[in-house]
Image (cartoon, rainbow, N blue to C red):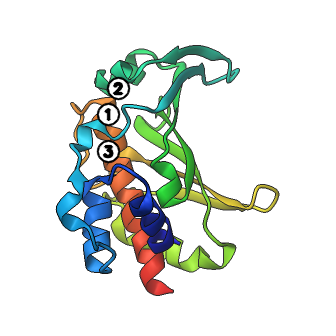
C-alpha cells in the first residue's frame, strides 16, 4: 500500500518529496533518480490544502480558509471553542487518510484529531497496537471503529498525546506532526505485511 503509493508519486513529474517519503523510499530502495529529487521544506506540505472552518454543533461551514490560516497558533481553537477545522490534502492519499479534522475538546481540554483511514479491516490489531504503543501520557486514549458502509477506519485521538506536541505550536506544525505520526502508522502496517 504505502510502498506502491510512494512509487507512484515518484513517477510523477517534478520529483518533489518530503523527508518522510524520502526516508521510506531510501529504506526500500525506490530511488533511482535520487540526485534529481527535491526534498521540500515540511512547512510547505499543506500549501495547496483545502481548508474549512465549521461550527461543531451544526457542522455548518463558517469559512473556507487560505493556507495562511495554518500560521495561527493552535490555541485559536481554545479561543473559538465552537469551531473545528477540516483539511484535505493530496498528501493524505499517500498515507491512506481522507481528510483530517481538528478541534479543541472543551470537556477533556485536549486538541482532538479526527479522520478516516483507508486501511483494510484485517489490520485492526496492528493499528490498535501502534496506537497503544505510541500515544504518550498517562491518560492517552483513542477511538477506533471500522465503518463498514464507507470501508474505512474512523480514528480519533488527542494531539496532546503525540510525542513532539507543544502548547505553542501553529496549526501547520500540528498538521505536520499528525502527518508524520500517520505516516509511521502506515509504514508499520506495511512492514507487518
Residue 31: x and y, percent?
29, 72
Which quadrant holds residue 138? bottom left
Residue 152: x and y, percent?
68, 59
Q: Residue at x 24, y 34 (%)?
A: 167
Please report whichever mark, 3 or 2, sits nearer to the chain's N-terminal start: 2
Please report whichever mark, 2 or 1, sits nearer to the chain's N-terminal start: 2
Q: Residue at x 34, y 49 (%)?
A: 14
Q: Is residue 131 visible?
A: no
113 to the left or right of 58: left
181 to the left or right of 119: left
Asked if disc 3 and disc 1 are in contact, CB closer than 8 Å, the reply is: yes
Asked if disc 2 and disc 1 are in contact, CB closer than 8 Å, the reply is: yes
Residue 49: x and y, percent?
46, 33
Residue beneath disc 1? 172
Between marks 2 and 1, how big is the CA–CA gap?
5 Å
Give neighbour class at mark 2: few <14, some 14-19, many 20+ (Cα, 10 Å): some
Residue beneath disc 2? 70
Q: Nearer the viewer, residue 95 or 148?
A: 95
Between marks 3 and 2, how big is the CA–CA gap?
11 Å
Q: Nearer the viewer, residue 19 or 33?
A: 33
Residue 74: x and y, percent?
33, 28
Classify mark 2: helix, strand or loop: helix
Q: Is residue 110 visible?
A: yes
Classify mark 3: helix, strand or loop: helix
Between marks 3 and 1, how big is the CA–CA gap?
6 Å
Residue beneath disc 3? 176
Extreme residue in the left direction? 35
Extreme residue in the right direction? 149
Placement of 183 over or under 159, stated as above or below = below
Amino acid at each position: 500500500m504505502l510502498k506502491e503509493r510512494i512509487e507512484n508519486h515518484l513517477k510523477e513529474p517534478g520529483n518533489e518529496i518530503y523527508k518522510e517519503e524520502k526516508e521510506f523510499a531510501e529504506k526500500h530502495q525506490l530511488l533511482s533518480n535520487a540526485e534529481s529529487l527535491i526534498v521540500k521544506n515540511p512547512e510547505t506540505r499543506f500549501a495547496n490544502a483545502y481548508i474549512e472552518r465549521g461550527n461543531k454543533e451544526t457542522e455548518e461551514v463558517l469559512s473556507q480558509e487560505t493556507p495562511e490560516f495554518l500560521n495561527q497558533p493552535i490555541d485559536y481553537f481554545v479561543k473559538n471553542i465552537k469551531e473545528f477545522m477540516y483539511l484535505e490534502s493530496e498528501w493524505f492519499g499517500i498515507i491512506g487518510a481522507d481528510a483530517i479534522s481538528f478541534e479543541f475538546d472543551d470537556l477533556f481540554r485536549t486538541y482532538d484529531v479526527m479522520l478516516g483511514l483507508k486501511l483494510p479491516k484485517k489490520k485492526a490489531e496492528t493499528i490498535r497496537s501502534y496506537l497503544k504503543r505510541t500515544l504518550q501520557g498517562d491518560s492517552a486514549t483513542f477511538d477506533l471503529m471500522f465503518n463498514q458502509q464507507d470501508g474505512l477506519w474512523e480514528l480519533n485521538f488527542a494531539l496532546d498525546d503525540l510525542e513532539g506536541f507543544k502548547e505553542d505550536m501553529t496549526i501547520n506544525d500540528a498538521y505536520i506532526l499528525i502527518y508524520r505520526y500517520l505516516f509511521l502508522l502506515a509504514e508499520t502496517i506495511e512492514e507487518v505485511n
